[in-house]
Every structure is written in C-alpha cells, then in structure tokens.
Image (cartoon, rainbow, N blue to C red):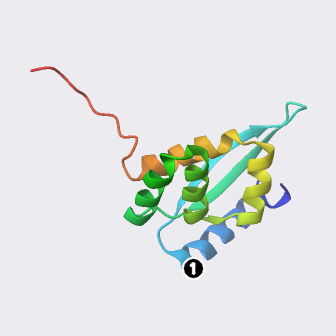
Amino acid sequence: MSDVKAHPATEADKLESELKAKYGELYRLQTELEDADGRLSELRIYARRPHRVHLSRFTKEATRDTFKALTTLILDTVVWPDKDELARLFEERPGLVISLGAELQHLVGSNQDFLRSRL
C-alpha cells in the first residue's frame, strides 16, 4: 500500500495537477484507513466521473455479480492509484469496493436521495 499512503501537501498538489492535466475533470475520493494497531492513514483515490457506458455495463453485470460489477466500475474510472495497487488494496480490504463503488454511483446520481410524499 506504499503508493496509496498520504503525501505531503506539496506532493499531493503536484500529483493532482499532473492528473488534471492528463485526464481533465477528476474527483478526489479520500478517507482514513485504520490498521490493526489503530493507526490512521489517509487514502486518496482519483477518478473520472462514470459515463453512461460505464453505468450500462455496471447494471448488466450487477444482475449476475454485484461485487464484480462494482470492481469493474471502479477499474474503468479510477486513474490513480494504478490497477495493480487497487487490486492489492481490495485484497486487503474488500469492503472498500462497495464503499468506493457507491461514491462513484453518487457522482452520477444513482444514489440520489429524493423527498417523496403521497398526494
């Protein structure tokens, strides 16, 4: 998980600038992870907003295997860290697939909350 650990502010800013220059509009998804000893480390993931084609693939795959569908959605849209690093991270913490997939869905309105009332 060495590439995924927190960067000093200047390194993080440089990385974000490079990624934005290469990919355009990006989203930073970050959280804190707690290790077995109770120490916290920051996890930053940079992703593009999922497009219709990604959601179409996701909904088709989700009927057979939701976990695989979420993993595919993530791998299709995340630009940093690389796929190998994500695979190691997901092997260590498989629940991150569900959390990260939900965040990506939220970016495009899939998990949007609505107020409803009976008329």
Q: Residue furthest bottom?
A: 22
Amino acid type at mark 1? Lys
Residue at 55% across / 73% down in the picture?
Answer: 20
Up the image or down, 2 lies above or below 22; here it is above
Q: Residue 10 at x, y = what percent?
A: 72, 65
Residue at 71% across / 49% down in the picture?
Answer: 43
Tell me the quadrant of the picture where the N terminus can be found: bottom right
Q: Residue 72 at x, y = what percent?
A: 58, 58
Regarding residue 8, the answer to whether it shows in the image is no
Using residue 15 as the reference point, say whether residue 34 is left or right of it. right
Q: Residue furthest front?
A: 64
Up the image or down, 20 lies above or below 61; here it is below
Q: Report the residue marked by disc 1.
A: 22
Q: Residue 96 at x, y = what percent?
A: 67, 43
Q: Judge by depth and name the residue closer to the eye, 82 or 40.
A: 82
Tell me the quadrant of the picture where the C terminus can be found: top left
